[in-house]
Amino acid sequence: MAYVAIADRDHHLHDPQTFIEKYIWSQDHKVIAIQYGSVAIGVGLVALVLSLLMRLQIGFPDTFSFITPYNYYQFVTMHGMIMVIYLLTALFLGGFGNYLIPLMCGARDMVFPYMNMLSFWVYLVSVIVLLASFFVPGGPTGAGWTLYPPQTVLEGTPGSDWGIVLMLASLAIFIVAFTMGGLNYVTTVLQARCRGMTLMRMPLSVWGIFVATILGLLAFPALLVAAIMMLLDRLIGTSFFMPALMSLGDINGTEGGSPILFQHLFWFFGHPEVYIVALPAFGIVSDLLSTHARKNIFGYRMMVWAIVAIGALSFVVWAHHMYVSGMNPYFGFFFATTTLIIAIPTAIKVYNWVLTLWRGDIQINIPNLFAIGFIFTFVHGGLTGLFLGNVTVDLPLSDTYFVIGHFHMVMGVSPVMVLFGAIYHWFPKLTGKMPNELLGRIHFWMTFLGTYAIYLPMHYIGILGMPRRYYAYGTTDFIPESAHAVNEAITIAAIVVATAQVIFLINVFYSLRKGKTAPDNPWGATTLEWQTPQTPPVHGNWGPKLPVVYRWAYDYSVPGEAKDFIPQNEPPKGHSSLA
Amino acid sequence: MMTAMVIAMLTAITVWWLLIQRLKDKPWMTQGVVPTSQEGLTSSAPKVALWAFLIVVASLFGIFASAYTLRMQGHGGLATWQPLQEPSVLWINTLVLVFASGAMQIARNRIDQDNIAGGRGYFFGAGLLTLVFLAGQVLAWQQAQANGNLGPSNPAFAFFVLLTAVHGLHMLGGLLVLGRTTVRLWRNAGTTNVVSRSKLRLSVELCTTYWHWLLLVWLGLFALLLST
């Protein structure tokens, strides 16, 4: 009897009929991915504007009267929170996770399409609640993105009346949305792979997204616990985190709460969060480099193991964010050691990316430019992490611009480079159109050089001792005039980089309308999403039969083969196709 | 704290080692279809998803428990912890929840043997017992408050209400699913459609797993409350 996959036998996929079912209340993972991506990029643009306002103030103090200290802290807080949670997490997992997992695993959709749809709409609610805080009395919270108590809920902190309540509520709603999506991603990877797609044949993009999702499912509860407890401290006067203190001349009535407890909870989520963003980037960039260097990924097994190892280690390093909060020296030693151990699997990955490029047939196209750019920015951000992982080095540097430079390089610029590379790489599959090459190159060079112009100097002014989180520096002896000049230059670079993102948006809309029609597999890639019968893939992805996988995802430039790539669903010579 | 960290590290290393055993394939060496590989969507997907969710639930309550312990020790601040006098009704509530779980298990066993009519009464009964449990928890809040004239500023009381409320919310979510399944058990009991019957069995099985898990969580929480 001919082989029929279970998914082909008696499976009714939700069939959208009306416009609303197809594009609004859609249960199709590809539409949900685009919805997630669009909202994430939209809210990310808000955060980008906020960062420009901050830079205008730092670069040109006393110039913009509408930027008050009150607003400035609101901009800092909202910029950080939006970028980390509502842009990066949502775009990598909600956007790329949704698009790539079913396509790369050879599934027709996520296992639970309805829950997947709910996940997006609940995410949208969380974004609306967050943005609503701009319009309430007192405005959004200005407590810093880490929301440390007690100052977060005390009068005098911007947004301590309504802003903080909306922020915490929005985070809780986001976590619900993420959990619904995350359960779907994990179950789909484990249970809906097509025939022949063993775990060790999965592309590294899926591996990265899969392990990041597991991290998210285990780490977000810590943030939820912290958010609920702080909300109760703020609204009904519990003292989970609030110690006894005098505020504006009054005793505030709380007693015995532990602000350090909040920090532990926050960073028990916060550090895995770094890898929730980084692991999908690691996975995706591996696929971009391999495809565009026309070479198999170097050390596939080691890459998978490194992703798993980094994921596990990321749960035992959180307190390295708290060295300056004070802790038992043995704890500091423990956390410094685990932090430095993470450098081992991470370095393995970096070597493997470079060795993948080594003697490859490197295509200098837009996705590959961004992927190679990522290696540079990630190495720079990673190396400064080794400095900060050591307690004694961290103490003097922790509250300076060195830290701003470090974490923006490693978890801001680097994942964003991969995101852009990924958007350009999959744009033809998503839209059926090729992105404009010239605009893409301008976008890359302005972004790549521009971000270096922003963050490299920050390391120097940080070592000089320039404190972060300050609204204005005035005239102090230890900050020389040249440091102010550097700050002006950084601000100008920031404006250039922001302009580059406008070019990116122009490219997206221009290519959507006027771009060249994309062939099914423009990059000559091996993974399944490029082997769909239609481009863009239609509902159900694969036509009547699911694909069957015969090989791993990296058969590029195989000796003795006519083509320089062999798709995963191409049978070995002498075998007939089972699909 | 240090012991917990060492245990966590050892667990992580063990899990990692086990994973590595699964991940020893050399995919570049082999071509063709691997005979053991699955074939598209498997029928056990809902069970896998439920277990993934239960692990998330365990993580949530585990973190709550850590926060409780740290706060109790006055971590980083002055210790002002006054232990709560646990309301006696909690013992009854616990017993009710054990019965609910037991009824659920009987329902599952019978429905598994295709005896839907014989099992659905127990299933519905489990729902009712759970409602009794939730009402009992609300009573416990009142008792605890009356015992010591406590308000939100007492951390032991605040934690007690918070933990039981979050656990109760999870039970309420379960009750929604239980309600839907109960309706189907009555409406579709006579169906001869194999797929419908297997879906009913699956729903009951998932509910049972969820109830047992939340019973375990409650027993853990109760032990934590009693020991402090």
Image: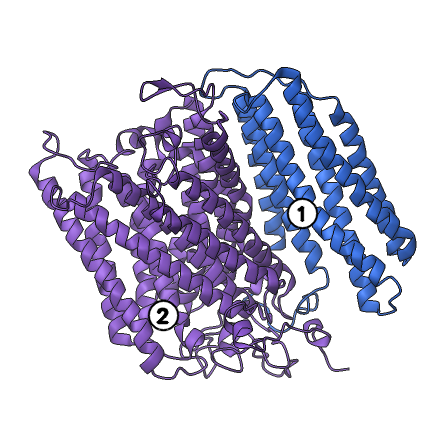
Chain colours: A purple, B blue
Q: What is the chain letter for disc 1?
A: B
Residue at 86% from the left image edge and 55% from the top image edge: B112
Which of the 4 image quarters holds residue A186? Answer: bottom right
Is residue A312 shown to the viewer in this render?
A: yes
Is residue A345 shown to the viewer in this render?
A: no
Find residue A376 and report its horizontal and vertical position in percent: 29, 55
Q: Which residue is labeled 1 in the image?
A: B173
Residue at 84% from the left image edge and 68% from the top image edge: B194
Find residue A92 and report its horizontal and vertical position in percent: 44, 58
Most extreme residue toward the left, as rendered? A481
Q: Quadrant of the N terminus of chain A?
A: bottom right
Against B34, residue A352 (above or below) is above
Q: What is the chain letter for disc 2?
A: A
Q: Nearer the viewer, residue B149 or B124?
A: B149
Is residue A404 found left or right of B147 in the rendered image? left
Against A348, residue A255 (above or below) is above
Q: Is label 2 in a helix, a strand or a loop?
A: helix
Amino acid of disc 2 = Tyr
Q: Is label 1 in a helix, a strand or a loop?
A: helix
Name the mark nearer the viewer: 1 or 2: 1
Q: Which residue is labeled 2 in the image?
A: A424
Find residue B199 and report its horizontal and vertical position in percent: 78, 62
Against A279, residue A330 (above or below) is above
Is residue B6 found left or right of A390 in the rendered image? right
